[in-house]
Amino acid sequence: MNIVTFLEMAASADPGRVALGTGTTYADLLAATSRLAGQWAGAPPAVAYAAVGTPALPVALFAAAWTGRPFVPVSYRLADEPLRALLGGQAPAVLLAEGRPAEVAATVDGLQIIAPDEALAATGQAPEPVQDPDLPCVLLHTSGTTAAPKVAVLRHRHLTSYVLGSVDFLSAGPDEATLISVPPYHIAGIAGLLTALYAGRRIVQLPNFEAAEWVRLAREQRITHAMVVPTMLARIVAVLEEAGGGLPYLRHLSYGGGRMPAPVIEQALRLLPHVGFVNAYGLTETSSSIAVLGPEDHRQALTSGDPAIRRRLGSVGRPLPTVEIVVRDSDGKEAERGELWVRGPQVSGEYAHGALTDADGWFRTRDGGWIDEDGYVFVEGRLDDVIVRGGENLSPGEIEDALISHPDVAEAAVYGIPDDQWGEAVAAAVVLRPGAAPGAEDLRSWVGERLRSSRVPAHIVFRDALPRNDLGKLLRQQLKGMI
Amino acid sequence: MKLHPGIRLRSAVSEAEIIVIRAPGDEVDLRCGGVPMIPHDQLATPGPGDGHDLLIGKRYSDASGDLEVLVTKAGTGQLTLGGQALTIKAAKALPSSD
């Protein structure tokens, strides 16, 4: 099937329900999509989108799907040169953009540029939507934190499998609303649109995340559901702590897209006791979430006296019923600890230059981890980030958690640097809280009291900030070159 | 008839429409309300109905799981494959994750 079928179903079952913002109904959204799709007869074979998340986003996404064109959201925040290179790689294409990205795009051959508002004012008439589940639906550039970004190919069958496997049609109550603040070029920005739309949950868009504005909008729009990445949650928590007022309407907050520091989630749970928290683990290549730690899991982990249950707060929960996750060693044999491999109908594992799934459909996540006896998946971080010290594999996340638990430490990043004696030595970049002044030796003994001595950082540097990408993902490889 | 994922069919006897999500490779006899289903651009001849409601957004599959369909428009009529009733796929209770 085609993702546009979801929109057609919702528009036929409940045409007057508000889909978007304060007044765009499902019928309105379908009509706008159809008009734009109708305008694209004879247009270039792909639709790129280099703008913030506004109503033009779902309309362009569905209109592209309607006509069988892949939709390619790209980061409008990229500097001129990388943006030009990336757009050049997608041409020939229709491009929705305005302002600086549109000016940059004007220097690229083969782009037919329209402003997002123009797309909403289209007046075409479309034939029936194309129905081929094998067509590429969305092309996304992966985060590229450990290597150059790759273009992941998500076909209609991957995204429709994900939506059908994770939400029920029009299951949301009439008062439910979701706040989407992750950008369109992130898998959660696309998957969140599709699942909210199929569930019948009103979508409110925040084009550029800013914590105080997020809190204001959540209150004003009576937001019940939202998804954030860890750095967003940390900033939201800071705003709530400083200004108070809480989030009285919020019921459900999911987080993912990176490792959540334990102090942040614990503080969020304390500040928002009425909210159900969901930790979602997934990759661009897996059409969003593949494992979920639900609200009940969070509550149990917080209150249980059993250490095996308590530690689940650091897990990503259990695989979706439609997905299999196993742990394998570097030879591909099942192991207790190793790399996480995933398989299921939503798993694409395919890039523009070729598929990376094996003959049995397994995709290697490049994430290290393990699974407890009740099936809870623990993700230890990117395998490329593992520090091999004297033959022992150390995962940076565990050492970062120990550092961050120090009251004077605001942020910490741990990475390996070459060492003549050990092969690799543990190094840490630390951002202190304002006014704090512990020395490297204080932090070393703090870690030594909590972890085995092999994990104590041999080198500690103090920095004003950590290098992160625009979604807050740590750029660990950049740190390696700095010490 | 031969089915493939993405093919849209309608009931010959009610308003119901489906889309095929998963299909066995061979010829099948897929019916709604006892009458073979028809391409979705053909016209149905609504009958009195057989008391079975097909709800929009529900998925049905055969015992083997080789055939799975999604109801895209509500109507009446039991879905059968080779005379065997398709069963509704149980709703899942997953927390929203994005």
Image (cartoon, coloured by chain):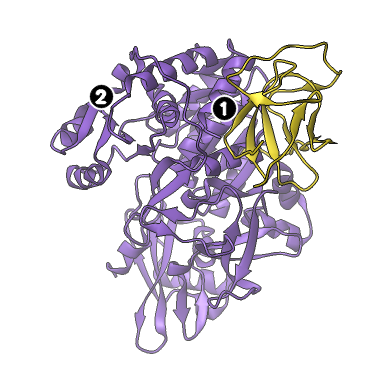
Chain colours: A purple, B yellow
User: Residue A115 lies in what quarter of the image?
Assistant: top left
Say above or below: A464 vs A107.
below
Which chain letter matches label 2?
A
Residue at 67% across, 39% down: B95
Q: Amino acid type of disc 2?
A: Ile
Q: Is disc 2 in the same subunit as disc 1? A: yes
Q: Mark 2–mark 1 contact, CB under 8 Å?
A: no
Is residue A474 among what the camera can see? Answer: yes
Residue in front for this viewpoint, A318 or A5: A5
Residue beneath the point at 72% across and 57% down: A310
Residue type at tag 1: Phe
User: Which of the two residues, A416 or A64, is positioned nearer the viewer here?
Assistant: A64
| Neighbourhood count class around disc 2 (C-alpha, 10 Å): few under 14, some 14–19, many 20 upward | some
Q: Counting other residues with Cα less than 10 Å from the Cα at mark 1, is it few (<14), some (14-19), or many (20 or more)?
A: many
Q: Residue A6 has which mark?
A: 1
Find residue A128 and report its horizontal and vertical position in percent: 47, 22
Name the disc covering residue A114, or none. 2
Tell me the element at label 2.
Answer: strand
**What's the CA distance linking mark 2 and mark 1?**
26 Å
The answer to whether residue A236 is seen in the rendering is no
Q: Nearer the viewer, residue A107 or A210?
A: A107
Asked if B11 appears above or below B60 in the picture, the reply is above
User: Is the N terminus of chain A in the top left, top right, bottom left or bottom right quadrant?
Assistant: top right
Image location of residue A34, percent across then percent down:
43, 18
List x then y, in percent, for residue A328: 60, 71
Tell me: A117 left or right of A15.
left
